[in-house]
Image: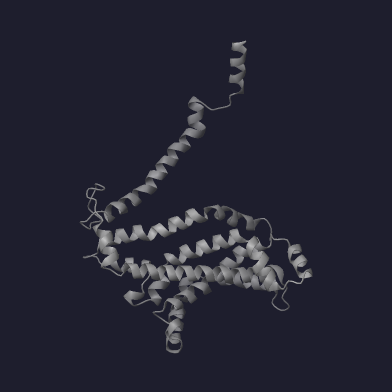
Amino acid sequence: MSTATTQLENANDTRLRGARWWKEIGWKHLFAIAMIAYCLFPILYVASAALNPGGTLTGSTRLFTAVSLANFTDLLTNTNFPRWMMNSFIVATVTALGTVVMGAAAAYAFSRFRFRFAGRRGGLTTLLIIQMFPQMLAFIAIFLLLLTLRDIYPFLGLESLFGLIAVYLGGALGANTFLMYGFFNTIPVEIDEAAKIDGATHAQIFWGMIMRLVTPILAVVGLLSFVGTYGEFILARIVLARPENYTLAVGLYVWGSDERNAPWGLFAAGAVIAAIPIILLFMYLQKYIVSGLTAGGVKG
């Protein structure tokens, strides 16, 4: 009886073993371990440089030979790094909120309304064509525009954080509208019609119902916008000229661009601190990322 039971259990056991396991599954584990080690090495290298009071980044082949928080203390007390980080938070947060609201409003309009002249298809096609041109073509135009606006509206001109935010908002509207448009199409129109029968206006439907149903895509767009503007360098370098108005990307670049006296210890410590908010934000919103990016491709 026991022999028959053992044979039956062996027949029902579908687990892979031996050479077959290595051929179908084992090599994937080895490849994953190798990729993790490859990705962790730069992080460990920067962390070692941040904890090294000697302030060296190159020329050392041994990690964590000296461990000290002197670079972090000096970074937070004797530099403009806290001001730069605050500027980055202001720019990224305001841009993310503005992008979500503007993109959601545009996507709702394209999804629900019908236009008499250009039409929905014409409007979406125009946005798509605009996105085809690389952003570098507009650098000179943006600089001259902000230079002129500085004489009329100083808070929107060069060397202004709000001017940089306005540039970011204008550049991100097209792509985010397309991303949200497909998601808005997955929301049944019958919900809008039922709310209209009850006397709801378009604003009440949009803010009270639709915005709650599209929370995943709002989180994804807000996250992508925050991360993109938090570490953006080129436009920030063009718009912001004063050291006190720098964002993190511009400030760290100025430190690293000094070929002879670059404070690599401060640079590495700043890079470690600057990465922490992005990691925490990804961990908090990770449940929305996959659903928000894939649900919009079902219909539309």
Residue 8 higher or lower than 190, as above or below: above
Res. 90 image quadrant = bottom left
- Left-right relation of 107 to 233: right
Q: How is the image coloured?
A: one colour
In this view, which residue lies farthest toward the right?
197
- 151 left or right of 1 in image: left
Query: Residue 152, relative to residue 32: is it above or below?
Result: below
Which percent across, then down, holds residue 208? 66, 67
Residue 201, horizontal then vertical, whole percent: 72, 73
Check the image and report above or below for 146 versus 72. below
Residue at 60% across, 60% down: 215
The residue positioned 63% from the left and 58% from the top of the image is 296
| Res. 132 in view | no
The answer, for residue 151, to whether it is visible in the render is: yes
Q: Quadrant location of residue 52?
A: bottom left
Q: Residue furthest bottom?
A: 152
Q: Is residue 297 above or below residue 210?
A: above
Q: Position of residue 245 (x, y in %)?
A: 36, 75
Report the front residue among 33 and 6. 6
Q: Position of residue 75 (x, y in %)?
A: 28, 64
Give the residue drawn at x 25%, y 59%: 71
Judging depth in this view, the residue of 78 and 225 nearest the camera is 78
Q: Residue at x 30, y 59 (%)?
A: 269
From the image, which quarter does the N terminus lie in? top right
